Image: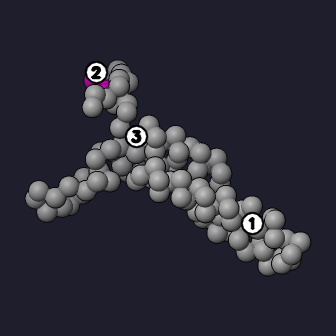
Amino acid sequence: MTHDRTTATRTATPGSVDARDALPRGGFASVTLPRHLARGAVGFGALAGSLALLPVVGLASLLLAPVGLIALRGCPMCWAIGLVETVSAGRLRRSCAEGRCDLTRARP
């Protein structure tokens, strides 16, 4: 059985609202754009630092590479996909009925 984040239900107390449930997000998206950009800065900074510090520190600088990959959730392309998902979260709505799906813009 697959788990779909947009259709999953969470157990919560009556009247409580979780900000993470307000907008549907993809698998790589972050909760907020600033958080996603911060993850990118840490990830790309650690990857660049691991290569830039190689002549100064030696092979020990390569220990920054896993930190960068973890911050980017696996790869730079995964981070870029997450950026697009984070920016577009809540702007488009998909509705399916009678075997046909339509993509429409969400109204504010």
Total marks in image: 3
- First in sequence, mark 3 or 2: give its number: 3
User: Between disc 3 and disc 1, whose residue precedes?
Assistant: 1
Q: Is residue 69 visible?
A: no
Q: Mark 3 is on which residue type?
A: Ala
Where does label 3 land, which residue? 89
Residue placed under numbered mark 2 in the picture: 98
Give the camera-side residue of 60 and 3: 60
Q: Nearer the viewer, residue 38 or 25?
A: 38
Which residue lies at the image location 40% right of the left edge and 53% below the top edge? Answer: 31
Q: Residue furthest left?
A: 14
Residue 18 in sight from this viewpoint: yes
Q: Which residues are magenta?
A: 94-98
State which quadrant residue 69 falls in.
Answer: bottom right
Residue at x 44% of width, y 37% of height:
88
Residue 101 occupies quadrant: top left
Per the image, label 1 sits on a secondary structure element best described as: helix
